């Protein structure tokens, strides 16, 4: 394994630790300053704007340097660009006229000394010479290209750049290019390579091809990354041109590792006042990139010679002094980007809390096997939207159980099974008060630590006469009477995945035959997604078990390829003697026709629950309860991502399996091509009973 | 593997990521706020003082709560202590009168709701009931103890405390205590256990033992941690009493995982003005703890009823208002701690830079196989002390080579082999100018990226007539003439470990028979150390290879057990036909008699080099060059730490082995007991030629 090497201190802190201890971040990366050198963001002087709470890379905007800055030109270009509010440069590193010559010194754009190490790594993305053509028929050109590419990458590594942009493949067959890049990627520890891809379905560039054939540039990217075996250091930089493919086709990229959108000045229109602006479709695309942490790089010659002495808030010339350099030719485009960025809605507070959870894989809770901690209870108890829904459902059930005539004579027996620290007890008592119904509550809880809090809550609130605390597992409690209403919150991100069915089967022993369960039913959903980041994070474990595990994850850099469909449903109570909690479902997904081909890395999962009659809650995207934060989606990965050709349906099978001590899922693709059955016998992932 | 579980967000961010990607810290722990909950430090209101640059835990001071704060007493105690400038409490969690009773609710010190989750985790260290005795002859007491210990730990886990202090072993045999603790440690993910150990060599407490036998409490700790297999979540909290063992005996603890020093008020003396103070030996010990990131906890009843209305800067009563609570009874002791802490010298700037490197393992450079990056050159070039020494050595050599009569007729040929970006070229030209000698310099460098910078340096400085740049590996360069002086800086932390001998053997082909090599010789050194943190970090890799690798590391939490001794020496040039760079050395270390027994985790290594005559540089602790920062020590681990009984010598053998393509070390202990030969055939660690 490659580790950071050193004799002593070095100016950038090491980013890989030899200490994988799970309990503490390693000292160097826990320090603010140094580690940020390696962050994908660039030290910004003036980010695009003040969009509240957005700490993602999309705040930063770079500019492409078109002409080779010979000699000491680079520092001047950098200073000018930074003072014009750009954050970083995409700049050529080596004279494009150079061809490998034995004994020659590489004609670099300035020596390493003209910028400080932190300037190099914070403000420069290297642009590899565009003439290189590794799949040419001309062998000398191929060999020159290979040598030059390696020399330029070596120089960029020497400078500790964070990333280099490598030019787009020149032909639809790019196997030799991919071989050399893959070869280079094996030796890189910190630097990323961004493969430049035009965002288009363009005419084929192969001379021997039929001119009428169009090429979907996503296919270039897909072949290239498959050849490079999904390298986690290979990214995409998309060239945005004046025409755009369909929105469904564009949507695929949100699940791909796009690092930058290189926006060509030619893609801009001109507004009535002569300023550059973008078409509605371009605006929508750019907003999509901003929302997916993609940085913009402005590129091209200025087509908008906006008068420097103009009215309007964007003018910078009112305070012109000798110190003020002339305005950057591309400033009007940057100003428009800042306008687009600032126009977006601010990130909601909840979203800001969750920003560090984006695309971060967590194992689902095992609430039966493990006891939750106080902090976890604390967090879930704050989800007032959820408990309001419960209170509404309980109130409706109470009114159905006890008519207005009976309110003074009938006392409903309600059992909260899995009472935790008491939020459902509170919701039940409030529902009783709201409806004027008398209530007797049993609060059943298996976690002795939560029971301690329950006792102090009951005492504090003076509920002793109404609430009885039972320190027991609901599955083995011997109840002294039967309940009219059974209330529980045992649902996971995928509905039944925290074993609500098994727990409620155990609890319905003490529910009256006409008793009500809240929730009364729940259903899980899945949809196919492109999620290259999640795939790479799982792959890093280098085992099959992690590819056969479901994860709770706040999905962010994900392309949702088709609407979600129902998987498993459960209803309670279920007194049928044939009832089983095993399930088997086959689903077919059709992608919109204009999507094109895509790669499926797995399935996003959700749930929706009917608490009682018309009161529901859930996270299925089309019907989700607003402002509820207790659940992130679940993700079922595929061991090998599946290429789905344009207009081919996806068929997936899901099983819910039950054993004596555990419950697990198995899943498999059947079309467009079969995958292995995942998680056979629950060998990799299961929930303990 | 255990991973953080969740349904969605939880109030504390997960600390283990499923993404072990080496290039980026995982998003959650890279965020400041959340991760700090898991840091060992406590959120301080008023740390001990303003010692510039010290960000270690020793800034924080806690106080032990002696009486069980029943009911809602804990928040009041916490508020009072924090407002008196203590940072955290060591507090009992459960009524000490409690004994396990079926069906009883655990009588905890307040419900989990009386403090917020962040208060629990930032300000409370749990104190496990002291009556528990897991090695009692009384079976009922043993069983009650086991159940109580597990219940209390479960409650502390529920509260997400960072640590619990478990009571000292009550007997010299504590196997059952260790078994139960080990069992608990297997299930803990985030919480630490701190085993309380009195810092003394005390009378044996076993009733059936000879009363005259003394017990070294370090032995208790050692047995306990060996039984718990060096668990990385098991730490020590040392009780400091009024009498102290010898300094050599105390020194052992600096290599052990000591988290806290619990300073008893009985250990304090009284100064002339009636205030508490410590003996000189206690002061030295406390300063040692401060310097090793150990936090102090004040404990005991106040023995110093200092008048609250006193003169002096420490008085807090001048501005007494109704809001000011009465002074904490232990405040005078805290004030004295703050005084001791603030009296220490500020951390030097260099030390502050390096704080995040403390005990952080790095692989040594492979400068022959890998090319250094610009940032690494930049860092090393800043070490002016080193280059000043080189310039002094070169000046002396020039004067010896060319007498004052010859200065106008003789031009010395000097070759810098491994010129990098040119610092030794500059030092050589400055030495020539200083001594009035004429110089012809060849700068030989194999890294083509550094050669680019060399060319621009020569041009910038106008040195074209004096300096010739050779882009080549010194081992295969065909020199056009022979050199009078050969200057190189190829030394690693262990002297020869970056293959200086092999490189200079290759370069001396073009040195005149009477030529001078600078450096002219160098020697490596080792000393045995206790270094439990390094051992645990290496162990976390779960393989043998990492235990057979040498690491560059800024040693911090380390006990140096005996003075360093010489290992290997090399002198240049060496024209003997029998010259070899293989070496074999046996060393015997005697520990000071009053040290007691100890555990050796490996050997710290250093070097010293003679540049020319009396000009040397090095990092061997007794002779090290002040303010030079290019090298941290090296560390050779042992696969299994070795217990060294009191007064037993340590014998270690070191080999330097040379193959066709690599050089490596092997090492082994012979006494007090043999270890396996480490790194046989260089299977785990080698330096490429």
Image (cartoon, coloured by chain):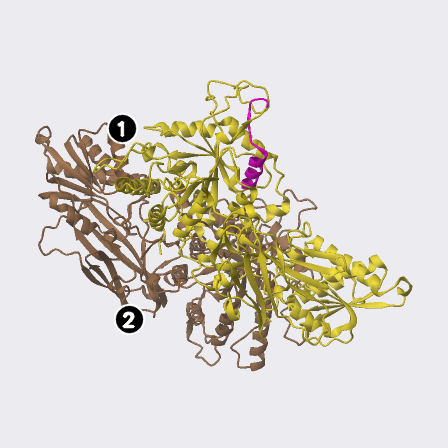
Chain colours: A brown, B yellow
Q: Nearer the viewer, residue B400 or A461?
A: B400
The residue identified by callout 1 is A460
Number of marks in picture: 2
Is tag 2's residue or tag 1's residue first in the polypeptide sequence? 1
SS for dot 1: helix
SS for dot 2: loop
Mark number for residue A674?
Answer: 2
Whether residue A477 can be seen here: yes
Which of the 4 image quadrants contains residue A667? bottom left
Q: Please provide percent x and percent y for residue A507.
A: 15, 46
Instruction: Name above or below for residue A136 compared with residue B464.
Output: below
Name the residue located 17 percent from the left edge and 39 percent from the top edge: A415
Instruction: Name above or below for residue B475 compared with residue A317.
Output: below
**Does the magenta-highlighted stretch encompass residue A31?**
no
Q: Nearer the viewer, residue A472 or A395?
A: A472
Q: Disc 2 vs disc 1: which is toward the camera?
A: 1
Magenta residues span B272-290
B388 sits left or right of A67 in the view: right
Question: Residue lying furthest right in this view?
Answer: B405
B430 sits left or right of B6 in the view: right
Within-10-Å neighbours for mark 2: few <14, some 14–19, many 20+: few
Name the residue located 54 percent from the left edge and 75 percent from the top edge: A133
Check the residue under mark 1 and report the chain it is in.
A
């Amino acid at each position: 394994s490659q580790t950071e090497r050193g004799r002593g201190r070095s100016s950038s802190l090491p980013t890989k630790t030899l200490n994988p201890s799970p309990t503490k971040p390693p000292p160097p990366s826990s320090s603010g300053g140094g580690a940020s050198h390696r962050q994908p963001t660039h030290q910004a002087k003036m980010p695009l704007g003040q969009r509240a709470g957005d700490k993602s890379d999309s705040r930063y905007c770079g500019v492409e340097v078109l002409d080779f800055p010979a000699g000491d030109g680079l520092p001047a270009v950098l200073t000018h660009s930074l003072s014009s509010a750009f954050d970083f440069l995409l700049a050529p590193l080596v004279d494009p006229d150079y061809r490998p010559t034995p004994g020659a010194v590489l004609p670099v754009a300035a020596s390493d000394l003209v910028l400080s190490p932190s300037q190099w790594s914070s403000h420069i993305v290297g642009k590899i010479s565009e003439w290189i053509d590794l799949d040419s028929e001309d062998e000398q050109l191929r060999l020159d290209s290979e040598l030059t590419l390696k020399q330029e990458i070596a120089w960029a590594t020497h400078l500790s750049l964070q990333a280099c942009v490598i030019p787009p493949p020149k032909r639809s067959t790019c196997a030799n290019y991919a071989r050399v890049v893959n070869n280079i990627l094996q030796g890189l520890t910190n630097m990323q390579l961004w493969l430049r891809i035009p965002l288009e379905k363009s005419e084929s560039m192969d001379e021997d091809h039929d001119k009428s054939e169009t090429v979907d540039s996503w296919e270039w990217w897909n072949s290239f990354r498959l050849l490079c075996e999904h390298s986690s250091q290979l990214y995409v930089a998309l060239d945005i041109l004046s025409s755009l493919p369909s929105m469904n086709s564009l949507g695929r990229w949100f699940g791909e590792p796009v690092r930058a959108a290189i926006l060509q000045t030619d893609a801009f229109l001109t507004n009535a006042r002569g300023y550059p602006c973008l078409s509605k479709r371009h605006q929508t695309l750019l907003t999509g990139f901003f929302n997916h942490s993609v940085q913009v790089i402005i590129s091209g010659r200025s087509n908008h010679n906006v008068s420097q002495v103009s009215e309007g808030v964007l003018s910078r010339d009112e305070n012109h002094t000798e110190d003020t350099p002339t305005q950057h030719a591309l400033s009007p485009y940057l100003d428009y980007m800042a306008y687009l960025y600032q126009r977006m809605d601010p990130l909601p507070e909840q979203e800001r809390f969750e920003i560090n959870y984006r695309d971060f894989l967590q194992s689902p809770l095992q609430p039966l096997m493990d006891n939750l901690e106080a902090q976890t209870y604390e967090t879930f108890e704050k989800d007032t939207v959820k408990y309001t829904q419960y209170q509404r459902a309980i109130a409706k059930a109470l009114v159905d159980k006890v008519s207005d005539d009976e309110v003074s004579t009938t006392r409903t027996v309600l059992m909260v099974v899995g009472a935790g620290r008491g939020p459902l007890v509170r919701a039940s008592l409030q529902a009783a008060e709201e409806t004027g119904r008398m209530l007797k509550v049993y609060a059943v809880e298996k976690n002795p630590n939560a029971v301690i809090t329950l006792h102090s809550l009951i005492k504090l609130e003076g509920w002793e006469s109404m609430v009885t605390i039972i320190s027991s597992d609901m599955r083995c409690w011997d109840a002294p009477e039967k309940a009219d209403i059974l209330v529980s919150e045992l649902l996971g991100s995928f509905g039944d995945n925290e074993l609500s069915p098994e727990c409620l089967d155990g609890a319905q022993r003490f529910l009256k035959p006409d008793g009500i369960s809240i929730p009364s039913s729940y259903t899980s959903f899945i949809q196919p997604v492109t999620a290259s980041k999640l795939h790479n994070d799982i792959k890093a474990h280098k085992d099959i078990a992690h590819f056969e595990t479901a994860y709770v994850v706040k999905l962010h850099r994900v392309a949702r390829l088709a609407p979600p469909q129902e998987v498993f449903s459960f209803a309670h109570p279920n007194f049928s003697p044939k009832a089983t909690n095993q399930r088997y479902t086959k689903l077919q997904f059709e992608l919109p026709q204009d999507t094109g081909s895509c790669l499926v890395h797995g399935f996003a999962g959700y749930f929706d629950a009917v608490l009682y009659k018309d009161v529901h809650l859930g996270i299925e995207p089309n019907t989700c309860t607003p402002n509820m934060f207790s659940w992130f989606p679940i993700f079922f990965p595929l061991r090998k991502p599946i290429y789905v050709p344009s207009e081919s349906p996806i068929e997936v099978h899901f099983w819910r399996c039950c054993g004596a001590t555990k419950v697990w899922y198995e899943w498999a693709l059947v079309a467009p091509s079969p995958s292995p059955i995942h998680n056979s016998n629950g060998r990799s992932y299961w929930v303990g009973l």
